[in-house]
Amino acid sequence: MENVWKIGSRWSDDGKRDSSIISIFRRSNVVFLGHKNCIERFKNEVKKGDYFAIADGLFVQSVAKATSDPIQLKELIKQNAIKVKEGEPFDLEDDWGYGVKVKIVDLPKDQMLNYKRGCFFKANSIAEKVKKLFNEKLEHRMDITAKTCRIKGKQGECNGKESIINGRTRYVIPVYQREYSWGYEQIKRFVDDIFKGFWGVDRKIIKEPLFIGTMQLSYEKYINENECEQDVIDGQQRLSTIICMLKYLKLKYPSAEALKQIGSLDWIETRVNNGKEEEYLNTMLSLDCLNNTDLDTEQNQYIRSIAVIDECFKEMTTDNEGNQIAEFSENIDSFVEYILNDILFVVIETVAGLSKTIQIFNTINTAGLDLNGDDLFKVRLYEYLHDIKGLGEETFNEIGEIYKNVKTRNHKWRKTHNWDLIDIRLVRSIYKEYIISKYKLPTSLYAKATDTFFDELFDVLLNVQGHNDMTGVERVELSLEDLWNIIEVACLWRGSDFRNNDEFIFYTLIERSRYSRYLSIAYLILLSNKDKQKEERLDEVYCVLRLLCRMFFCWSIMYARQVNEMLSLMRNIYNKTADFQNNKEDICSSLTEKIKENDNRMFRTNCIGQPIADNRVWKDLICLLSDYMDEVEVGTPLEELKDKFEWGYYDIEHIHANCNEKEGTDINGDLQNSIGNLMLLEYDINRSIGNLPFKEKKERGNNKLCYKDSCFAVVKKIMQEENWGKEEIEERRKEEIEKISRFIFEDRE
């Protein structure tokens, strides 16, 4: 059974208030101690899975769960697992203690627990409360408050508006946020708006308050009585631009009195991009002069922003001769005070777990995170791996590598192709079907949209809320390995060309059928046999597609829509693909039996032989298969076949034009619109010949397009006919029905 330990967060012998290292714990996802009287017990008794009540003084401010056994501090430091900022009360030379990796849940003020002093001991009296607080992870809380804030008001002046720079709050841009990315247009618009508010269009100082939107912050996370942290959920682009502007003003106008009230600019921290973004931020904050930054080569976006701000200021504060406008140079302090006091935000603070926090953000729908399905999946997968599986913050960067890999593959692919090889939406779609198949979840879930499926899956896995139709999803285990495997499989399938004509027609008939969605079965089969050689894996896919194309052909021309019988059958087939090697024979047998159900006179006469001209799917499938079999007979190469069957290249031609009186109008509509009188023909030829009589369609003078210009085998076959009337149409219909029936029902591997 897991123990619950109380551990202090002050790194000093006398427990000084300013020695709290809770920020290091949070940033590093580690708790550690160095008290000589406690080290042995910590090392020997703490185990992976134990809980911690992290206390500062007399109360517990955070709870945590160990994701590792105890590790020497020097080893954690060697692993770069302990992340310390300058000025914090821990020296990386203090490597003589022990620590464990943990997942931390910070408590809102109203959930903090009063508890006794001490460095490290068992917290039996609050053990159940600590476990409950950790395991709920605030997912059953949703508290929202809003307030109007300015950047920094004058001391003693509030006027109902709090200050962003308040001397106690450190703003943390969490790991799941994107990098600082505002470019020239956004920054220029921001600076222009500030100057318009300061002196209008006439350059007469008016100081009209400027509202720049909302920010969403987490609840305050306690450091000590005088200091706290808040995560920036939305607004980091504006907040980062503001800190760049304040740095610029300090460098440009160092003697301005109004700037002295700002103090240091160390109140923002970013955990994005595995420390790289923090490095860029600190480099910008350490600038001691305004250099001429080359915007085309500078990689540091914070420094690029300062250069853009400088350019905008020069444009706004100098006249046509480049001289400083007196109205500005004489009122620098007034301008700075305007920025600090009269730029207003609405700050929304939320007490909730990450999933509900993101839901709140999505409802507010401001302009920070791009919460499309792909980005939301990234955040919630990180939350699952971090909170449920106990992985560290580096996991978000590992997820980011998957997204980056997809972009890299597409960039490389695009050098020789005009389409993308893969995208994250496809990866998620495959993952949805893989999860349902692997865990034998209700087959109705296949019909859910990918975004909806993952929204509800994460709701259940993260204990946010239940969904009645998500039965059994508690058993699902998500992993990054799954995603890497899916990417490899997707690239293998989409990057592989057809090896012969049969593979091409199998794929094409499914693609043109009413059931094209089920081409995705290829991914599931490939995932089930990833240890085999590529050619053998592809053979297994086409073994199934060979049967599916025949079955879908039948059901697509029997009905004018998808039918539940097919949907139900395919869901059951999909659920067998996770163990394809053991279920292959069963899958193929069930498909074969389904095809044989239509091997009868009714199907031949009433389906293949029916009038099909008014139904796009019917006429396309039947005419395409008709020509394909003629192409095979004359030995058409694969590449030529692919060109001929390209969408938009061909049209469906009525050989006999009943509306042409010269041709004769003795053929009824059913026969006129049957396969006996229809064939593939190049689009431009079909439009050129219109409703001409048969003989003129075959041969025309003056180099006008006609049948003899066609490359289709079926047209060349028709060209051998002297006349084309009722007798010829009936005979061809009979021949085509038998030819197509042989392909469907007399399959030979």
Image (cartoon, helix red, strand yellow):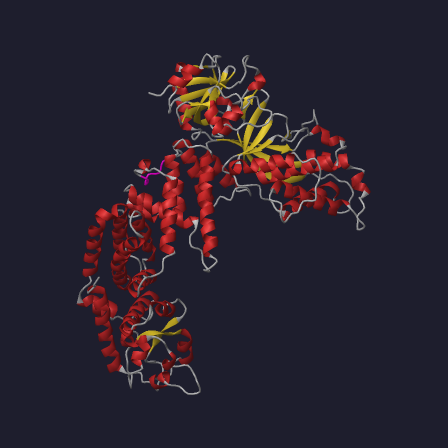
Q: In which quarter of the image is residue 550?
A: bottom left
**Nearest the camera: 719 or 651?**
719
Image coords of residue 657 (percent x, y): 34, 80
Relative side of 6 to 182, left or right: left
Decide if residue 584 is in sight here.
Answer: yes
Query: Magenta span covers which residues?
Result: 466-470
Q: Which residue is drawn at 29% across and 72% down?
A: 635
Q: Give how far across and how far down residue 291 sits, in percent.
A: 70, 41
Of residue 744 and residue 367, the one placed in the foreground of this image is 744
Q: Position of residue 495 (x, y in %)?
A: 38, 56
Tell whether 121 sits left or right of 86: left
Q: In the displayed structure, would residue 329 be above or below residue 120?
A: below
Please identify the dominant SS of the magenta region: loop
On screen, 640 above or below 458?
Answer: below
Side of 730 where 40 appears, left or right: right
- Residue name at image x 75 percent, y 33 percent: 254
